[in-house]
Image (spheres, grey):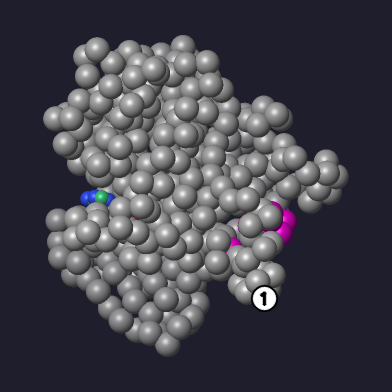
Amino acid sequence: MNVLVLNCGSSSIKYQLLNMDAVPVVLAKGIVEKIGLTYGSFTYKPEGKDKVVAEQPIMDHSVGMDLILKALVHPDHGVLKSLNEIDAVGHRVAHGGEYFSESVKIDDEAKAKIKALGEIAPLHNPANLKGIETMEKLLPSVPQVAVFDTSFHQTLPKKAFIYGIPYEYYEEYGVRRYGFHGTSHKFVAEKACRILGWDITEKKIITCHLGNGASITAIDKGKSVDTSMGFTPVAGLVMGTRAGDLDLGALLYICEKEGLDLPKANNLINKKSGVQGISGVSSDFRELQAAMEKGNEKAALALDVFCYNVKKYIGAYAAVLNGVDLIIFTGGIGENDNLVRWETCKNMDYLGIQVDKQKNEVRGKDTIISTEQSTTTVMTVTTDEELVIAMDTVRLS
Ligand code: AMP
């Protein structure tokens, strides 16, 4: 069975075609970028062949999707003989609100709910829906499935998702903690337990998804019980360019001082903050470390703040879980950045956490990085959100 996985943003489409017959194989992948701008770009990488890159205007999502489908069946670099070989399409959908605690096969009702949730996820859900509707037109007989970033966190107890604001804002507008990166947190927790031969329903796990967006989740007996992102993905950890937890009074004060309106304030907390904002150097941890090594104090401070925040959340979630059996690092930073893992986990022996310096010198692997004596196991586990989407698509289509 071949599954096309799509992650549609407002001006981009990330895609992968996977064959799911036995061991999943990525047949082709790539990205369409700068949709709607004068110069769009299209990249396509078929398995075992050279990458194809094209620069051209890509007016809208349907033009972008058409490029993807044509590339997949291209006589030279295609990986399919015909589009009939695409058996299902899986979509990453950002916000499932309280409607979707599971992935779902797309029908009119699902589309109506995804559309309605555009109200609370205006940056993502409309683009996700556009992807679904475009695919319906281009491949009308192919089943489609939506996999939500939020659904894994629908098991949060009310005390973990209600904010300290008038209750009617939850009732009237759905303002509450939803959490994101759910597919990744679930995937790495289950994968780690498979590797360790553990029964997830007996374990207390903290998953740290540290990428450009970053979040931490407390998982009790396989269920998400708390998570650091909130109503939107701007909450929780200090991230690449997102502020994370911030005194709301401070934001109001800055808005007043700088005369910021809502879009500008939104831009400030989402695009100009985080380690980028602190350092003034970069949101990329490789560049931050290079700057720190050259003596840049703000880059060093940004890294310090980041690790300190991850540590604080681990401590908080150990309290929530009443202990922790396993801590997992994943995402671009979590999988690759040994310094962040080391700085985060050091001086946490009160929690039985002891990282082995040598084992920690690892990148992009599924492996234990804690010492034999560490009573809490610490692992790096590679995430694969596209694979989760493909697996759910196979199951539901
Ligand atoms: P993601 O959003 O999960 O793709 O993660 C992207 C981020 O991972 C980048 O912005 C970098 O900060 C970080 N990253 C990727 N590779 C490395 C690496 N080798 N060392 C340190 N950080 C890395």
User: Hey, what amino acid is under mark 1?
Assistant: Gly
Question: Under tag 1, what secondary structure?
Answer: loop
The magenta region covers 116-123
Name which residue lies at 83% across and 44% down: 166
> On the rendered structure, is 175 left or right of 152?
right
* 54 in relation to 127, above or below: below
**Residue 244 horizontal/vertical position (percent):** 53, 50
Name which residue lies at 22% across and 59% down: 295
Can you see residue 267?
Answer: yes
User: Is residue 120 magenta-colored?
Assistant: yes
User: Is residue 104 magenta-colored?
Assistant: no
**Residue 349 horizontal/vertical position (percent):** 34, 19
* 360 in relation to 55, above or below: above
> On the rendered structure, is 99 left or right of 91?
right
Name which residue lies at 42% across and 76% down: 34
Residue 56 position by quadrant = bottom left
Can you see residue 195?
Answer: no
Residue 296 position by quadrant = bottom left
Which residue is denoted by mark 1 in the rendering?
259
**Residue 297 horizontal/vertical position (percent):** 30, 58
